[in-house]
């Protein structure tokens, strides 16, 4: 007679229902607050939050409403350097613990003496926490529940419920990170289709994805060192790192000009990732959009033929003009006589109504590649 496997203890029905809500929130980020409110209540807390390791990840984690209020103050008032939960808790998670309690990371004496606990946590009645820690693709994650001194520490029954919920929470986190990564890759692909070189950074400032046109610039003016973007010239790298740091903090920042020895520069603009990507655990932190002034952007010949009523040969010459080539270079590249190229340019001026070649090139620049030709 074969032995039956011992069934794994399950979390409370309320916890399982709340975790199911969190799975729904991965695809419908607007319901994160209520899903995490239900999770907090299921674990005996008044607030709950999910985030990966790293201060940067605190910028936009999914959190229940009360916890979200605390996190906004935590970030804006620079409390990170005083956070014993982060300083000590992550080491416990990385050592393999499934559940971390407040008493594992701070003593009652430390909490009474700590401005963070007395000025921030106590003001929100969130001086005590218990968290589930797990590793997802080598990255430590935590699901935290918090409450105040009036409720007292989480008891053995509540901690056991957290421990039993850990496998289901891990599955939810894996689902969320996969979905977020797919969304981020799709966003980069969309920029690639629009001929926009782009680099996606995660909340830690590491390169998460890059379009092909962006990676083509690596090794010339940019490098990826230890997973992080860097400029090859020291005088450019400092402004680039300042730009990345500012955008990850949600602060406005001016574009950076990455100089190249003996060539035209690269313009780097940064946009913080908000909305769906940020809601889905903030795996993406910023898009860097690159404009290479040394590049010769291609013209979509099918588009320009349809828009301006050009012949195939006229479209070829127009495409070459749009890249900044001279009439001599166009004649050589298309194996045409110089007189033929000049005649085609006259025809282009007539069909477009441009007053001269400068105005013609400016018009064509508005029809630069918007998709496969």
Image (spheres, rainbow, N blue to C red):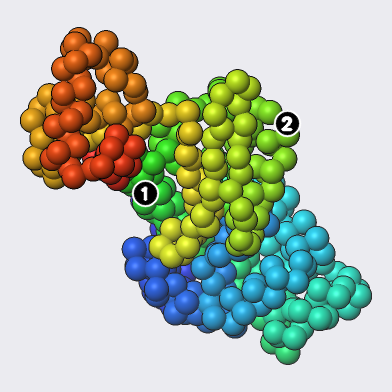
Which residue is depicted at the point 45% across and 41% down?
198
Q: Is residue 230 above or below residue 55?
A: above
Q: Which residue corresponds to the image point at 75% horizontal and 86% vertical from the top-left? A: 123
Q: Nearer the viewer, residue 178 or 98?
A: 178
Between tags 2 and 1, which lies in front? 2
Kindly tell me whether residue 97 is visible in this rendering.
no
Q: Is residue 202 left or right of residue 350?
A: right
Q: Is residue 351 above or below residue 221?
A: below
Helix, strand or loop at mark 1: helix
Which image quarter: residue 48? bottom right
Residue 22 visible somewhere in the drawing? yes
User: In terms of secondary structure, where does tag 2 sit?
Assistant: helix
Image coordinates for residue 53, horizontal then vertical, percent: 63, 53
Is residue 328 toward the left or the right of residue 66 in the image?
left
> Disc 2 marks which residue?
234
Q: Position of residue 84 (x, y in %)?
A: 79, 63
Measured in 3D between alpha carbons, the distance from the residue under mark 2 to the one under mark 1, in whole angstroms, is 30 Å
Q: Position of residue 213 (x, y in %)?
A: 40, 32
- In which quarter of the view is residue 156 placed? bottom right
Q: Quadrant of the C terminus?
A: top left
- In front: 59, or 87? 59
Which of these two is toward me, 235 or 189?
235
Q: Residue at x 72, y 40 (%)?
A: 238
**Extreme residue toward the front, this view:** 355
Label 2 vs 1, first from the N-terminus: 1
Which dot marks residue 113? Answer: none
Crowd around label 2: few <14 · some 14–19 · many ≥20 (10 Å): few
- Determine whether label 2 and label 1 are within 8 Å by CB: no
Q: Quadrant of the N terminus?
A: top left
For label 1, the crowd category at 10 Å Cα-Cα, with few meaning under 14, some 14 to 19 and many 20 or more, is some
Identify residue for label 1. 187
């Amino acid at each position: 007679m074969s032995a039956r496997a011992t069934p794994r203890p399950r979390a409370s029905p309320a916890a399982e229902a709340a975790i199911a809500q969190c799975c729904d929130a991965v695809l419908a980020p607007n319901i994160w607050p209520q899903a995490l409110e239900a999770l907090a209540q299921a674990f005996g807390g008044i607030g709950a939050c999910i985030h990966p390791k790293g201060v940067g990840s605190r910028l936009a984690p999914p959190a229940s409403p009360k916890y979200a209020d605390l996190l906004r103050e935590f970030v804006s008032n620079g409390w990170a350097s005083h956070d014993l939960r982060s300083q000590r808790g992550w080491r416990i998670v990385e050592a393999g613990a499934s559940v971390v309690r407040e008493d594992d990371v701070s003593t009652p004496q430390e909490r009474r003496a700590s401005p963070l606990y007395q000025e921030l946590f106590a003001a929100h009645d969130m001086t005590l926490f218990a968290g589930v820690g797990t590793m997802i693709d080598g990255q430590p994650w935590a699901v935290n529940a918090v409450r105040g001194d009036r409720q007292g520490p989480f008891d053995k029954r509540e901690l056991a419920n957290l421990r039993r919920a850990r496998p289901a929470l891990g599955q939810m986190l894996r689902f969320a990170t996969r979905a977020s990564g797919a969304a981020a890759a799709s966003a980069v692909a969309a920029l690639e289709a629009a001929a926009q070189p782009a680099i996606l950074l995660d909340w830690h400032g590491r390169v998460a994805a890059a379009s092909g046109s962006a990676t083509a610039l690596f090794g010339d003016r940019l490098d990826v060192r230890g997973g992080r973007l860097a400029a090859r010239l020291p005088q450019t790298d400092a402004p680039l790192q300042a730009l990345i740091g500012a955008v990850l903090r949600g602060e406005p920042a001016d574009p950076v000009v990455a100089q190249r020895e003996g060539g035209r520069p690269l313009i780097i603009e940064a946009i913080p990732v908000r909305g769906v990507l940020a809601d889905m655990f903030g795996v993406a932190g910023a898009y860097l959009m690159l404009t290479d002034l040394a590049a010769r952007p291609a013209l979509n010949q099918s588009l320009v033929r349809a828009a301006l009523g050009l012949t195939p040969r006229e479209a070829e010459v127009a495409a070459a003009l749009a890249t900044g080539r001279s009439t001599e270079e166009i004649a050589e590249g298309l194996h045409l006589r110089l007189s033929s190229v000049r005649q085609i340019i006259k025809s282009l001026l007539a069909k477009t109504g441009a007053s001269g070649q400068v105005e013609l090139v400016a018009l064509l620049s508005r029809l630069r590649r918007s998709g496969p030709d």
